[in-house]
Image (cartoon, helix red, strand yellow):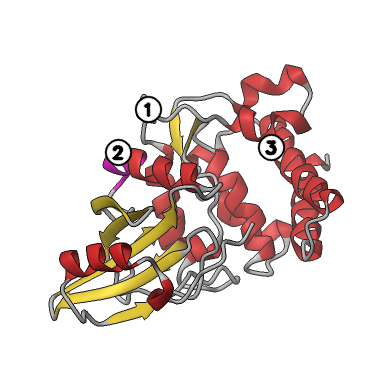
Amino acid sequence: MRVDRPPFEELPEATRRAIADRVGKDCPRAEVENGTSSALASLFWPSEKQMVFIKGLPLDHERIGELRAEVAVNPFLPDSAPKMLWQQEAGGWLLVCFEGTDASAWAWFGEGSGHLKPVAAVLDELSRRPAPQRVGLTPWERWGEYCDPADEPFLTGDRLVHSDPCATNFMIERSGRVWMIDWAWAMRGPAWIDTALWGMRLVLDGKQTPEQAAAWARTVPAFAQAPREAVVVLTEAEARSWEHWQAYGTAGLEETIQAARAWAEYWASP
C-alpha cells in the first residue's frame, strides 16, 4: 500500500521544529520521489560536507510498525546499509534520520548493466551474515500460506534476510559502492532467499529472461548451493502471493505477476 505524502509545510509544527532543531533552520531540503512506505522522505544538507535522509510516519499510521522494525534492526546491518543517526517522536510523528548517500536513485537490473556484479557482491555478503536475535520475522510467516505445510524447513534458517531486493532498494554511487536500503521487512531465514527474490526482480525490473536472471543468481554461492526443491517452493509461493493480492483487489500487478510466474515456472521445469 502506497503511503500518502503531505507537503512538508503541512506537517505538524512540532514535527517541523524537531527537524529544524536537528539539521538547522532553513536547511536545504529535497524530496525523495521513489519509495512508497513513508509519509515523509526528504534529503537535508546541514552542511556542505554532510547530507542526511529523514523519513517519518504518524504514530497512529497502520505501517508504523514497519518503521519501528527498521529502527530496531539498523545497528545490526552490514556496511551496505545506511546507518541510522537518530530517531525522535515529535508532533505525533516518528522521525528517523539516516546518513545520506550521493548515489543513483536506484539500480539498473538490465542484462549488461554494470550494477549487476556489485549488487550480487552485496547479496553474497548479506548471505553470510547471521540474523540478530531481535529479528524474529521468518520467510515462512510471509510465504507459508502459499506452501504445503511440509515445506516449512525449506524457508527456515539463521541468516539475515532483506526480503525485498527490488531495483529501487539498491542505490549505486559513482565509485561503484552499493547501498541496500529500506530494511523494514528484515527476516531470519536461509542464506539464498534474497538472491532467489532478486532473480525475479531481474525479470521484472531488468526485463531479463529467466535464463539470464538464473545465470546472475548463480553467481551468488549461497544460491548456487541451494536445493532446487527449496527454490521451487519459494518462487512458486512468491508468484501465488502476487496473484493473491491481485484477487484481493490490488490494481497494477499484471507485469509483476507475469514476471513472478515466469521465474517460478523456470525453476519448476525439469
Residue 181 visible to the viewer: no
Mark with earlier residue (3, 1)? 1
- Judge depth for marks 2 and 1 and give the one in front: 1
Going by the numbered disc 3, the residue's amino acid type is Leu
Q: Which residue is mark 3?
A: 234
Mark 2 burial class by Cα count in 10 Å: few <14, some 14-19, many 20+: some
250 falls in the magenta region: no
Mark with earlier residue (2, 3)? 2
Looking at the rendered structure, the secondary structure element under dot 1 is loop
Q: Which residue is mark 1?
A: 134
Q: Picture coordinates of residue 146 (x, y %)?
A: 77, 33
Mark with earlier residue (2, 1)? 2
Residue 123 visible to the viewer: yes
Going by the numbered disc 2, the residue's amino acid type is Phe
Going by the numbered disc 1, the residue's amino acid type is Arg
Viewer-proximal residue, 165 or 45?
A: 45
Looking at the rendered structure, the secondary structure element under dot 2 is helix
